[in-house]
Image (spheres, rainbow, N blue to C red):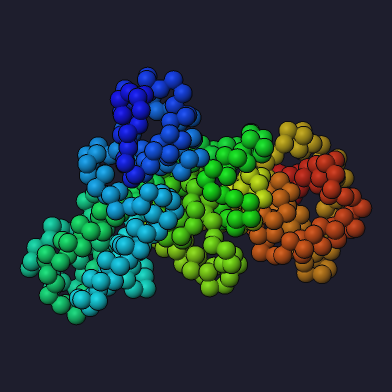
Amino acid sequence: MTTQGPLDLDDGSVVYVPSTSWSFLTTPETLPSQLKSAGALAVVVNNDDLKLPPEFVEACVHASIPVLLLPKSRTLDQLTAALAEETTRFDTRGLHISYLDAIRRALNGFTAVTGTEAFVVMEGAVVSSAPVDIAHLIKILARKPVALQQSMCAMATLNVPLPASGHTLAIHNPSRVALDLTGIESLVREIDTYAQAIEVKRSARRQIETALVRELIEANVASATLDPWVGSFDLAPGSRVRAIAAVLPESMKSESEVVGNALRDLGLLDGGICVTGAHGGCAYALITLPDGEFGRSDEITGFEHQLKLLADLFEFRHQQALSLGVSSCVLRGSDDLVRGLINARQLADRQARSTVAEMDEIPLAVPLSATLLAAEPELAAVLGRALLQPVIDYDREKGTSYLESLRTFLALDCQWATTATELGIHINTLRYRLKRIERLTGRGLHTTADRSDYYLALCLRESPGSG
């Protein structure tokens, strides 16, 4: 498309908009509805188009017209050919799932003929024709990928790179059956085409997804403004959503997009709507669950297995651990997603701390007032005797750990659900413990003044020289 003239399209057309065309479009936000009514299947723009109007992308999202980024390694004809089999109704999630199913069918067909096990290893997920034994799979991945030769096709394991998508085809051939080189090459081409199509299509919303995640994390925008934006991603009220946070090792803070790709793979495999983004050296994802599967023990077990597989793949590739946190909610508005992402981040931080030696406790940030009071040990002692000693005495007499519960609650900014998860107890148990502390001390944790005194007492108790 080079002008704003009439659109003469057939159903299923792919419209290429070069960067030079934007100067012809005085109202680019009106174009997606025209494309939709004209039967366009998708819009393609250059992957380095700095003039791409954000309002155009947002309007495309609302019109269910995907904006695809044309990779430098592919021509428009190649991309159009990959889209040719699709119907005019373009549902992003459905296409992802159909391509994923096509990959599974290709793997299953190959293994049925050869008696092998085959796996497509992505950044954060594995599509397979058999249950995944991650330890054995990593052994296959540890082999150096080499160009296929007919003489190699009777080996017990094969590690074959997929050139376009960057994924890996791993084959386990325990019987050392002589495999047909042509058959493997055909499988590689077929799977790579599907995998590349998935990547091209889901790249369309990558930047706008990251922008949404950033706004949710920073929580600077009113929920009334964020709610329609959230809805444009098909995250509808009543959806059951997992919020996932991944805290990277310090040496990889600048590579959060790598983990973002892994979380996208996880969302793809889980079959729900997936919104991901990187912010502040962390990667985040919001993944919906199909209706009726929220809280089922078998579904939870399956997801936990996928999450562990993601972490194991990351550690194998980067020789460093990835800290993950997961929080779930029923979506009523964007505020639920804000809380979910924050809770997931806190849980990921907790896991990150647990990997560091001698850092079992969450550190208390020391306020200036505690520093000043530390110079007055008699005043500090009065505060400790009034607020902490009754709890210490009760813990000693009853064998409880109420002081630890109080400390964790205050260190986590009085977040009830996060504190309960940190302590490994039910939230009602936490409420009972804190009410008992209030009765023991005669002070309340529901007021800012009393919370401040408790916090000061704890900081002074842990300060150097406090005894």
Image label count = 0
Residue drawn at x 63%, y 51% as measured from the top left: 237
Quarter where residue 217 is shown: top right
11 up-or-down from 437: above or below = above
Residue 218 or residue 224, whichever sits in front: 224
Q: Position of residue 210 (x, y in %)?
A: 48, 39
Q: Position of residue 115 (x, y in %)?
A: 23, 78
Residue drawn at x 71%, y 46% as measured from the top left: 413
Left or right relative to 403: residue 312: left
Q: Position of residue 165 (x, y in %)?
A: 27, 50
Residue 88 or residue 206, whichever sits in front: 88
Residue 225 or residue 377, whichever sits in front: 225
Residue drawn at x 21%, y 63% as measured from the top left: 187
Quarter where residue 206 is shown: top left
* Res. 217 in view: no
Q: Position of residue 12 (x, y in %)?
A: 33, 45
Left or right relative to 315: residue 217: right
